[in-house]
Amino acid sequence: MTEGTTTVGTAWVGADGVFSTTLNLQAEGLNAITASVTDSYGNVGTSPADVVDINTLAPTVSIISAPEASYATSTVITGKISTTGLAPATGDTLSFTDNGSAIAASLVTINVGGTYSATVARHRRLGAGCLWQYRQQRRRSGHA
């Protein structure tokens, strides 16, 4: 298994053609992984590249909407998610806490470009310790 000219894993292929290995990918961003096999006659077969995106850098989340001082049962919070790797997408989660306690959110929408809006339930006025957390699902970016 190679990424460019660098060997990132090796494996023995079973009689049924099945193999598995752990890859040692180091580079952030897109990595094109290729598998090659040599048979007993010296013939070499190479797979098409499988592209994976390695993103170990945490995204940043900012709040755009102004704090609301009412005692309404819910409020809409808007903001922006900035990432260094994959853009925010369906399947990513955005969660909210107030002084360490989870705040229920319904109707969370993450838009193209990373802006978001979320309707959050309030049982009391949101405090100064209100934080937002964003989790991005690891996704394959497709095949090369």
Image (cartoon, helix red, strand yellow):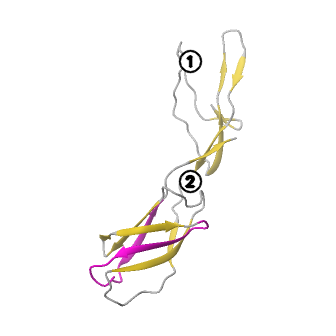
Q: Tell which of 99 and 10 is nearer to you.
A: 99
Provide residue 104's location: percent of width, then percent of height: 33, 69
Residue type of the residue flagged with mark 2: Asn
User: Which residue lies at the image location 47% right of the left edge and 86% below the top edge?
Assistant: 66
Please provide the residue range marked out in magenta: 112-135
Residue type of the residue flagged with mark 1: Gly
Provide residue 13's location: percent of width, then percent of height: 55, 19
Provide residue 17's location: percent of width, then percent of height: 56, 18
For this view, does 125 lie left or right of residue 17?
left
Q: Tell which of 116 and 131 is nearer to you.
A: 116
Q: Tell which of 95 and 84 is nearer to you.
A: 95
129 up-or-down from 96: above or below? below
User: Badge 2 is on which residue?
Assistant: 55
15 up-or-down from 92: above or below? above
Q: CA distance from mark 2 to mark 1?
A: 31 Å
38 up-or-down from 120: above or below? above
Q: Earlier in the sequence, mark 2 or mark 1?
A: 1
Query: For the residues carrying marks 2 and 1, which lies nearer the camera in this image?
Result: 1
User: Which residue lies at the image location 60% right of the left edge and 61% below the top edge?
Assistant: 84
User: Badge 1 is on which residue?
Assistant: 17
Q: Is residue 133 magenta?
A: yes
Provide residue 134's location: percent of width, then percent of height: 46, 64
Q: Is residue 1 magenta?
A: no
Count residues near mark 2 (Cα–Cα under 10 Å), then give few for <14, some for 14-19, many for 20+.
some
